[in-house]
Image (cartoon, rainbow, N blue to C red):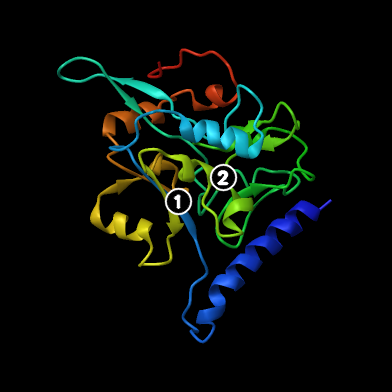
Amino acid sequence: MNSRREFLKLAMAGSTAAVAAPAAASAQAKPKRWGMLVDLRKCIGCQACTVACTIENDVPEGQHRTAVPVYELDGPNGPSQAVLPRLCNHCDEPPCIPVCPVNATFKTEEGAVVVDAEQCVACGYCVQACPYEARFINHKTGVADKCTFCVHRTSVGLLPACVETCVGNARVFGDLNDPESEIRKLMAQHETKGLRPEFKTGPNVYYIGLDDRLASTVAVGGGARDLRQGLETSAHGEV
């Protein structure tokens, strides 16, 4: 029943050990902590990330682990459109974990929030608990599904599929504990924001260029969950 969970833990431990081996002498070395930075100035809303994720993770048609909804914002010169890549935020304090009655959702040693499909009973509590509307019940597997930061790829040194295929290099993935990583350097150079800070979840997905109006639209419900469930919706703020 725990075979998938053990596989994920072993994969994470193996990748960490392989990378950390040359620095084994350093008692101060920190474990990796994965995070993602999205530069909204570079995102063109092409959905290449959505397609790559769907293919890589065999996500059913009409459902998405990541997507790029288009929002309409009111401004002094009239309405304008803005895109916002959405995915699981792999929180430091994920609200989806304590609500699971069978402990199917857990965090890897490197901070990714994942689901043990063999343990999940598809109660949907985690879907409702996520303030980022990043979870859904997979139509094909019948269990909870979400972005995993492509843990099967990162465990062997590859980038998540969405990052690797982003044509504008808008997505940057890396170790938040490494001050020399690209993601940390960019975060030091630019103002970054997270979504839904009022929930105090400690999200590990950050944005450069996040307009306050766009953040407010997301806060009142941009329809991301409906998008992932493949439903047609006219939720407030999304077109």
Amino acid at pointer 2 = Pro
Q: Nearer the viewer, mark 1 or mark 2?
A: 1
Question: In the displayed structure, does residue 5 sit left or right of residue 167?
Answer: right
The front one of 101 and 113 is 113
Question: In the displayed structure, does residue 48 sit left or right of residue 190?
Answer: right
Identify the residue at the far left of this view. Answer: 77
**Relative to 198, does residue 46 appear above or below in the rendering?**
above
The spot of residue 48 in percent (x, y) is 47, 32
**Secondary structure of residue under mark 1:** loop
At horizontal 75% and vertical 31% (from top left) the residue drawn is 142
Q: Quadrant of the C terminus?
A: top left
The numbered disc on residue 95 is 2
At horizontal 73% and vertical 35% (from top left) the residue drawn is 143
Q: Badge 1 is on which residue?
A: 204
The spot of residue 65 in percent (x, y) is 57, 35
Can the viewer see residue 65?
no
**Relative to 128, does residue 98 appear above or below in the rendering?**
below
The numbered disc on residue 17 is none
At horizontal 55% and vertical 48% (from top left) the residue drawn is 149
The quarter of the picture where residue 83 lies is top left
**Relative to 42, does residue 110 appear above or below in the rendering?**
below
**Relative to 23, does residue 163 appear above or below in the rendering?**
above
**Secondary structure of residue under mark 2:** loop
At horizontal 66% and vertical 27% (from top left) the residue drawn is 60
Question: In the displayed structure, does residue 19 sit left or right of residue 152?
Answer: left
The spot of residue 170 in percent (x, y) is 36, 42
Can the viewer see residue 123?
yes
Inter-mark Cα distance, 1 to 2:
14 Å
The spot of residue 197 in percent (x, y) is 39, 43
Along the polypeptide, which appears first: circle 1 or circle 2?
2
Amino acid at pointer 1 = Asn
How many numbered marks are there?
Answer: 2
